[in-house]
Image (cartoon, grey):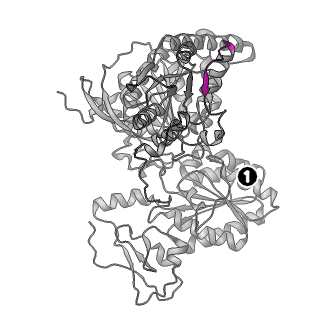
Amino acid sequence: MVNYKYSILNDEPHQEILLGNDAFVRGMIEADVKVATAYPGSPTSGIGVRLAQIQDESGIYFEFSTNEKVALEIAASAAIGGAPACVFMKSVGLNVASDSFVQLSKFTLPGGLVIILGDDPGPHSSQNEQDNRHYAKLGKIPMLEPANVQEAKDYFCFAMKYSQQWQMPVVIRSTTRICHQTGIVKFGVKNKTNIQRKFDPNLEGGYIPLPATLAPLRRKSLKNLEKWKELADSGELLKEEIFGNQIPQIGFITSGHTYAALKSALRILGVGAAILKLGIVYPLPMEEILTFIQKYKKIKILEELDPIFETQIKAALFEHAISHIELLGKSNEKNYIDLMISEYNPSRLVQMISQILNLEVKNVIYSPLLEVPKRPPQLCPGCGHRTSIHVASKVIKKLKGYSMADIGCYTLGYLPPYEQGKVLYSMGSGVPSASGMSLALNGAPIMSFIGDSTFFHAGMPGIVNTLFNKHAQVLMIMDNGITAMTGHQPNPNTGKKSRGAKLFHKYADTKTISMDKTLAAWGVKFIKRVPAYNEKMVEDALYEAFEFAEKEKTLAVVIQEEPCALMRSTAERKAGTLANPYYIDHDICRNIKKCLLEFACPAIEDINGQAEINTSLCIGCGCCVQTCPMQNKPIKQMEDFKRI
């Protein structure tokens, strides 16, 4: 037995319990992927973490690109050059990459390209719950949807096999439940690709979609899609089964995570049913679906989010003049809006199926999800963003202005008590939102927030536009030196500050791309960098910036700097150098509670009507001391404290 540092690299036949994200990585290993790219975003961030860990041993080149569009273009071009490639991103990341994504099916990709999308019904960690099955149809790209962890691995290998065979891209649509669940995975044999690494710019119509060349390229795309229709109708990745010992009362058509939730619900209800599980979700295996439908009088289509299967199946029934089937979906239900929102879990499906079959749910014993105590999302104890947003809220209120949000940990500034960041579209939208608001409100004080990773991802065009069109606003850049919200991945601002010497070591010696110098090169005249933990310096810088922006009718930038508190405190705990926590001396404290109600650090708790500091949460930053209005500060640092 070979001693592997990471067992996921073990090619000997065996089984392991893997996360869904790790199963995708194992699929890449078995499919002999050579190039993988991504921009981090839940639920697919874990794929990148694992690839970074094994990058030396696996032979897979992996990078965190500056955004999803760049990542897609790198992977696609690697595939054009003959390298088996993969790109992965979260659901809304495809919006960023879509301009290039919709072109891919027209091109010949000898190396093969698999695109993993992490959709987020719920949503759990996204600004919407868009259904990316729409993109498959728009881009004319086949899409697979695994229903468990084993299928995540197997479907990747299947997708790469046919991607290389037909030299076209393939999409795998996963969801949060698949990416983050665990299951037993049977490891397969590693495939050794013999594809020649070369670039033929004239291969099958070339790679320049001009009006004169578009028709043959589009024809090739549609012909490739016909191959996938034949493959789908041949029964590949299609599973038909009878669940339970009873004669089926109803037939279900479903896919992905909903398949597992459906079986759990049927088990709870004790109901027999026929199930058709789809693995290829675009193009649909319509011949097989119509054959299945005609076996039963009542069919229920179960799909999370949009009625995509339903719309296509109803059209096929009409086309084939099949009218004796009772087809139930979403659009013909009174509560169809509710059915298009959030994910399907067993509890929800128990209610849904019992209504269809007229079952008394109260007589059915089942265990709904346990109620978990509600914990609102919040910035970590010691987060530099909290101090800066706390100060910004005071400044904005005094100036009677508004602030615009962006994507990052600092988005949480929208929540009480800070209530900053009033408009949010997507990554990089904060600065343009501030520009538009300043035009509408005729010069009212407007500011926006952006993080260092978002700055490089999608923030730069909006900033340049603000300078070019002379929009007066203040931009606060939240520089914590890492892409924190998605799990501490590196970005162009990270450089040697990355924890990546151990995990992302390829970036450990990378020279930081300076935001300050970049802004100065664009012509920003007001750039002030301040320590996030110093409220007075942050406040003075903001007032100065607003004065400058109003006077010069342009952009003023304040960069607050403090390493991610979670990353720093974790490292300092391990090293035994974490500062002692603070406590409140109630002999002095007048119980004003500004530290609790206005600063709102989660380490400060309300215990029997008094503010108390939880020493296990406090990382000793001391920022709460600055918020106390008392001259004789009751918040003091412990002298003798032993951290566990």
Q: Seen from this angle, which residue lies furthest left? A: 1
Q: State the residue in front, 191 or 213.
A: 191
**What secondary structure do most residues of the magenta stretch adopt?**
loop
- Residue 572 appears in view: yes
Q: State the residue in front, 562 or 249.
A: 249
Residue 327 included in the magenta stretch of the image:
yes
- Look at 36% across and 26% down and name the residue there: 29
Q: Where is residue 296 in the image (x, y as percent from the top left)?
A: 53, 19
Q: Magenta segment, which residues?
A: 319-330
Q: State the residue in front, 63 or 200.
A: 63
Q: Position of residue 607 (x, y in %)?
A: 42, 77
Image height check: is 255 above or below 522? Answer: above
Residue 366 included in the magenta stretch of the image:
no
Per the image, label 1 sits on a secondary structure element best described as helix
- Look at 56% across and 21% down and name the residue there: 297
- Asked whether, in this view, residue 484 is left or right of residue 396, the answer is left
Quarter of the picture containing the C terminus is: bottom left
Quarter of the picture containing the N terminus is: top left
- Residue 102 appears in view: no
Q: State the residue in front, 520 or 3.
A: 3
Which quadrant holds residue 10? top left
What is the three-letter code of the residue carrying label 1?
Leu
- Look at 66% across and 13% down and name the residue there: 217
The residue that label 1 is drawn on is 467
Q: Where is residue 433 in the image (x, y as percent from the top left)?
A: 71, 52
Question: Across the whole image, how many numbered discs are drawn on residues?
Answer: 1
Which quadrant holds residue 550? bottom right
Which quadrant holds residue 209? top right
Q: Where is residue 469 in the image (x, y as percent from the top left)?
A: 78, 50
